[in-house]
Amino acid sequence: MSDLTIRGKTAIVGLGETRYYKRGAAPDPEFKLTLQAIMLAAEDAGIDVRDIDGFASYSNDRNDPPRIQSALGIKHVGFSNMFWGGGGGGGSGAVGNAAAAVAAGYCDIAVAYRGLAQGQFGRFGQGAAIPVAPGGMAFTAPYGLMSPAQMFAMRVNRFMHDHGVNQEALRAVALASYHHAQYNPNAVMHGRPLTEEDYDNSRWIVEPFHLFDCCQENDGAAAVIVTSAERAKDLKHKPAYILAAQQGSDYRQAAAAHNAPDYGTSNFKSLAPRLYKQAGLGPKEVDVLQSYENFTGGVMMSIVEHDFCKPDEVNDFFQLDNFRFDGGKLPLNTSGGNLAECYMHGLELITEAVRQIRGTAPCQLEKEVNISMVTSGPMVQPVSNLILSREAKP
Amino acid sequence: MSDPYPSSQGGAAVASPPAASTGDYYLPVGLPQPAPYPEGLAKEYWEATRRHELVVQRCDKCNVFQWGPEFLCYACHSWDLSYVQVSGRARIFSWERPWYPVHPALKEKLPYIVVLVELPDAGNVRMVGNLLGDPLQEVVIGAEVEAVFEDHNDVKTPFTLVQWRVV
């Protein structure tokens, strides 16, 4: 691993989020939502939106930088970048790419953004209505394995088998998200509390995932502004310094027809140590964690692979009380996350991680948050992760 | 040294497992039909299923099995790969039971079982299929299964799926 690093050189200084909607409920099209989020983020940072000269997104975002640049009348763009791969694997990665571009001098102010209107463009939770499934899809789709939940359920099932994990461990992840959403007025599931009984009685989507193990399908947009640590000091809010950002994938994780040699994994085994090494700290120093929930089982494996608990301790560790913002050992998904705030492809996890550093989260931790961490996109390839800090060089 | 895995081009050296009768499908018709990669990879596999032969790609140089098929061997980077016939015996490696119709054709058939099996006589490469029988049956990781060829002959481009049945 190279000694060259972005550690502490940049910070997140602006947050922009549209209102979050259930799928199909947004009054505006996706591109308009994306512009709104970027403008809100610039306003929050206290910069002129025309000064943004870098763009980073992920998951084949449809809202491309040339159109955004033209729409906003931006004179020059020095960096525009798409993180490969689907799902939310690139949430932290887009922020990391923005930070790298700023640190390398490609641009001065970068925005990492995601616009997503599933009402306008179709749902992730449905299989493609295609007559023929060629190539790698041919090995799965004709057998009724077509949706993301189905792509990942067998990885989770294998992990649960290998380590004797009970359904209640997955339930704890869902309960944590819903618990926190009840304090967050911007959460789509605000006012919709979830009990253990609700979870247990909910229908199966695909065993071992109940309805509440699966993320929502939503409309909205979110954006975060990244600039140099130097410049960050003079802006409106307390900067959330980017201490470490990693991206990548383990050995042959994308092998077709579910042939990844290590199967029951969130794909963070090689990334997690690199993240901690770059940050110069370990899991014990992490005050609060936002862990991408496409499905609760992915959160479980992400938490294990980032060494917050051992695989054989999952049943003991995965309890709602451990994940609560008010007194939990590892406060988790403190805005409600993809399950209960909004599935903004995990960019809403990054805005929440920044709010925890600023001290402005609806579920703000009582203690001062020094280290705020995000993991993005378990089980997809590639994945990414991020550590934010109150200090540039802690 | 004799080759325990003769190329499928050389004819069937291994007895073909039993076939499901035509029209007897585990999942309803209307799901996407399988096809090779646009560049041609996996063509030999789908052709072999029509003959009720299960084949897996194997490196001619280092004998590593790989699945799905690729243009080169991931282990030694040889470009010389063949499809070789394997026995069709496997073990359940993981499974899932879908209850939600992700495709309109599935509304009539819920739940159903998807299994991921590993093939001990092919370097433990894995294949996805359905587990035949009661969709509510208890599925045991590690259970022995065998391939069952499900012919779909009543379509414009006939194809054969490889399903699995507990032995």
Image (cartoon, coloured by chain):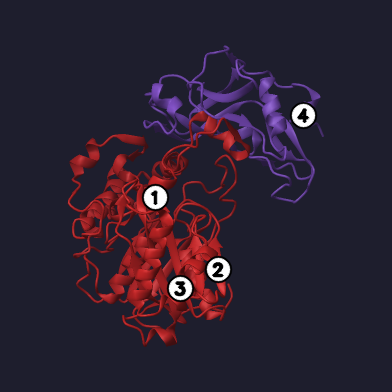
Chain colours: A red, B purple
Disc 4: host chain? B
Instruction: Check disc 4 and report the residue beneath it.
Output: B6
Task: Give, as a three-letter code, the residue at label 4.
Answer: Pro
Q: Is residue B153 above or below residue A130?
A: above
Between disc 4 and disc 2, the foreground one is: 2
The reply to whether dot 2 and dot 3 touch (C-beta < 8 Å) is no
Q: Secondary structure at mark 1?
A: loop
Between disc 1 and disc 4, the foreground one is: 1
Q: Are marks 2 and 3 on the same chain?
A: yes
Between disc 4 and disc 3, the foreground one is: 3
> Crowdedness of circle 3 by 10 Å Cα count: few (<14), some, many (20+)?
many
The reply to whether dot 1 and dot 2 touch (C-beta < 8 Å) is no
Disc 1: host chain? A
Instruction: Check disc 1 and report the residue beneath it.
Output: A294
Instruction: Check disc 3 and report the residue beneath it.
Output: A244
Between disc 1 and disc 3, the foreground one is: 1
Residue shown at 52%/65% (left/top)? Answer: A65
Residue nearest the viewer, comparing B94 with A383: A383
Residue nearest the viewer, comparing B26 with A71: A71
Q: Secondary structure at mark 3?
A: strand
Instruction: Check disc 2 and report the residue beneath it.
Output: A80
Q: Measure the alpha-carbon separation of dots 4 and 3.
A: 52 Å
How many marks the image carries: the answer is 4
Residue A94 place in picture, x, y as percent: 48, 65
Q: Measure the alpha-carbon separation of dots 1 and 4.
A: 43 Å
Task: Give, as a three-letter code, the residue at label 3.
Answer: Ala
Question: The C terminus of chain A is located in which quarter?
Answer: bottom left
Task: Give, as a three-letter code, the residue at label 2.
Answer: Ser
